Image (tube, rainbow, N blue to C red):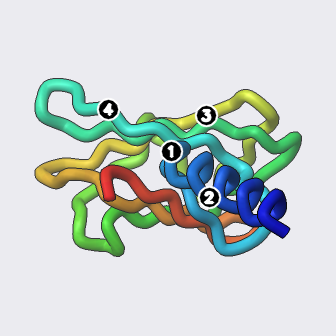
């Protein structure tokens, strides 16, 4: 029983260290955030063979965002494809993405 708790605790530490939480199954994106010239840049990279991004939200709608490029939603991604979101005048704490596979929430700096 101790061994099981140790494995569960380790899995929890890994999930926190990765900075992601999800509402269902494995997440279809790897998400990272960096600040470039005062603008938070959120990078979404697909780790699924096929995923459709239908909507996104930064800091529960409290952050002005723009999708990189001139792409209209929905966007379809294959494994390894990605897109950048630009978040202005805010520190990114949470990114939520709605896809054809469900809605997933990624947390940062908490």
Looking at the image, tell me whether mark 4 or mark 1 is earlier in sequence order.
Answer: 1
Q: CA distance from mark 4 to mark 2?
A: 24 Å
Q: What mark, if any, has residue 65 been given in the picture?
A: none
Q: Are marks 4 and 2 in contact (CB under 8 Å)?
A: no
- Left or right: residue 7 compared with residue 90: right
The residue where tag 4 is placed is: 34
The CA span between labels 3 and 4 is: 15 Å
Please tell me the numbered disc located at residue 17. 1
Single out the mark in the foreground, 3 or 4: 4
Q: Of the two numbered discs 2 and 1 on the same chain, state the one appearing first in sequence.
A: 2
- 4 or 2: mark nearer the eye: 2
Residue in the image at 78% along x and 64% along y: 2
| Residue 45 on image: x %, y % | 62, 36
Residue drawn at 18 percent across, 48 percent down: 88
- In the visual, does 102 lie left or right of 55? right
Q: Nearer the viewer, mark 3 or mark 2?
A: 2
Q: Nearer the viewer, mark 1 or mark 3?
A: 1
- Provide the secondary structure element on which disc 2 rests: helix
Query: Is residue 45 left or right of 5 when viewed as pictured?
Result: left
Q: Residues within 10 Å of mark 1 (few under 14, many from 20)?
A: few
Of labels 4 and 2, earlier in sequence is: 2
Residue 94 falls in image quadrant: bottom left
User: Counting residues from the N terminus, which is met first, the one under dot 3 or under dot 2?
Assistant: 2
* Mark closest to the chain's N terminus, 3 or 4: 4
Q: Residues within 10 Å of mark 3 (few under 14, many from 20)?
A: some
Calculate the distance from the C-alpha at mark 2 to the C-alpha at mark 1. Answer: 9 Å
How many C-alpha atoms fall within 10 Å of the one at disc 2: few (<14), some, or many (≥20)? few
Q: Which mark is residue 12?
A: 2
The CA distance from mark 4 to mark 1 is: 16 Å
Which residue has dot 3 on it? Answer: 82
Residue 50 drawn at (x, y percent): 85, 46
The correct choice, above or below, for 50 with respect to 97 in the image is: above
């Amino acid at each position: 029983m101790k061994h099981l708790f140790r494995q569960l605790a380790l899995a929890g530490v890994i999930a926190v260290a990765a900075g992601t939480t999800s509402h269902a199954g494995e997440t279809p994106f790897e998400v990272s955030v960096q600040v470039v010239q005062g603008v938070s840049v959120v990078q979404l990279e697909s780790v699924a063979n096929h995923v459709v991004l239908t909507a996104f939200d930064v800091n529960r709608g409290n952050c002005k965002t723009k999708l990189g490029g001139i792409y209209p939603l929905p966007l379809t991604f294959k494994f390894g494809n990605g897109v950048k979101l630009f978040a202005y005048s805010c520190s990114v704490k949470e990114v939520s993405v709605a896809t054809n596979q469900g809605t997933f929430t990624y947390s940062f700096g908490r």
